[in-house]
Amino acid sequence: MRAFGGLLLVVLIAQAPGVGLGAEDALEAEVRALAGELRCPVCQNLSVADSPSEMAKQMRDLIRERLREGDRPEAIRAYLVERYGEWILLVPPARGFSLLAWLVPFVGLGGGLAGAGLLLRRWVKRSPATLPGVDGVDPTYLTRVRQEVEERKWT
Amino acid sequence: MKRLLLAAGLVLLPLALLAFGLTRDPRVVPSPLVGNRAPDFTLQLFDGGQVKLAELRGRVVVVNFWASWCLACREEAEALEGIWRRYRERGVMFVGVNVQDKESDARAFIREHGKTYPNGPDFTGNISIAYGMYGVPETFVVDREGRIQHKHIGAVTREILEREIERLLGARGDRA
C-alpha cells in the first residue's frame, strides 16, 4: 500500500509540469501533427516536422502562428497546397492520378492471392493424373519391370 | 504464348513506371503559381523604406529570392543588376527578397555586387512560403496585371530575363 502511494506521488509529480503547459503542449502537438504530413521542400523525403532545416523551421513557425490566430489545420494545409501543389503532402490524396498509389498495392495483393489460389487448385486437381501412372503402358513391359524389381529385392 | 505476354506485361509495366520515375528530378517542385496572381507582400528594405507588391500593379516586376551563401545567387547577380539597369527606364521593377541569411552577410553581398534595385530580408520566411519557394535562387516574373508569368529555378541568365521581360512588355504596348 505504501509502495502504491509512493508510485502515485511519483506519477503526480511527473505530470505536474504538464498541467501548467497544457495549452502550449497541445499547440505543439497540433503543429507537429500538421508538419508531419508535409514534405520539407529543401530535403529528400523528410517531413517538415522532422527536418532541422531553416525552411522547415519557418514553416513550423508559420503553422504555429496561424494556429494561434485560430486558423484550422485544414485551412493551413490548403494554403500550403495552393502554394506548393499536392507535392507538399507526404500522403497523396486518394483521388486523381494519386489514387493509383492507393489502389495499386491492393490490386497487386488481390491479383497475387487470386493467382496463387488458381495455381494451387490446378496443382491439386492435376496431381493424381500426373503421378507415375500405369495408363497406356504396354502390359508386357509392366510385368517385366515388376519382375525385375522383385528379383532385385532378394539379391 | 498468351501467358508469356501477360507475364512480360506484368513485369515490364512496373519497370516502365520505375524507369519513368528515375528520369524525373526529385528536387524539382512543380509550381502551381505560374499563371496565377502573385501573392502580395510588403518588404522592409535594407536601406530603409519598403516595397509593396500590390503598389507595383501596372509594371512588370521581377521578384528574385536569394541568399548571400548561395553560389548560384553569386552567379546570377551580374545578370540581374545588368538587366535591371537596362529596363528600369521602361518601367520594369526588380525586387530582391533575401532569405535564410544573416543581415550583415546580405548587406555585404549587396555591396559586393553593386546591387541598386530594392532588396530586403524575409526574416519569417512567410514571403518565400507564399511563393512556394524551396531553394535559392528562384526568380518570378510578374506581369502588369500582377500575375506570375514565369518562374525560374536556379541561376537566372540575361537571356531568360530579357526574353520574359520583352514578352510581357510587348504584350500590351509599352506604357512606360
Image (cartoon, rainbow, N blue to C red):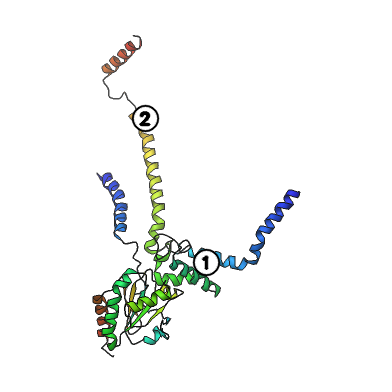
- Residue drawn at (42%, 69%), measured in percent from left and top? A81
Instruction: Say what amino acid the circle numbered 2 marks.
Output: Pro
- Residue drawn at (65%, 64%), measured in percent from left and top? A19
In depth, the one of A79 and A140 nearer the eye is A79
Q: Quadrant of residue A14?
A: bottom right
Tag 1 and tag 2 share a subunit: yes
Q: Quadrant of the N terminus of chain B?
A: top left
Instruction: Say what amino acid the circle numbered 1 marks.
Output: Val
At mark 2, the secondary structure is helix
Q: How many marks?
A: 2
- B142 relative position to B124: left or right: left
Look at the image and tell me whether residue B98 can be seen.
Answer: no
Name the subunit of mark 1.
A
Q: Is residue A25 above or below residue B61?
A: above
Q: Is residue B102 above or below residue A118?
A: below
Residue identifier under label 1: A31
Q: Residue furthest bottom?
A: B175
Separation of marks 1 and 2 at Cα, in angstroms: 65 Å
Q: Mark 1, residues whose alpha carbon is within 10 Å: few (<14), some, or many (≥20)?
A: many
- Residue drawn at (39%, 52%), measured in percent from left and top? A107
Q: Position of residue B59 (x, y in %)?
A: 33, 86
Name the subunit of mark 2.
A
The tag on residue A128 is 2
- Residue drawn at (71%, 55%), measured in percent from left and top? A9
Q: Is residue A102 above or below residue B59?
A: above
Look at the image and tell me whether residue A140 can be seen.
Answer: yes
Q: Mark 2, residues whose alpha carbon is within 10 Å: few (<14), some, or many (≥20)?
A: few
At mark 1, the secondary structure is helix
Label 1 or label 2, whichever lies nearer to me, is 1
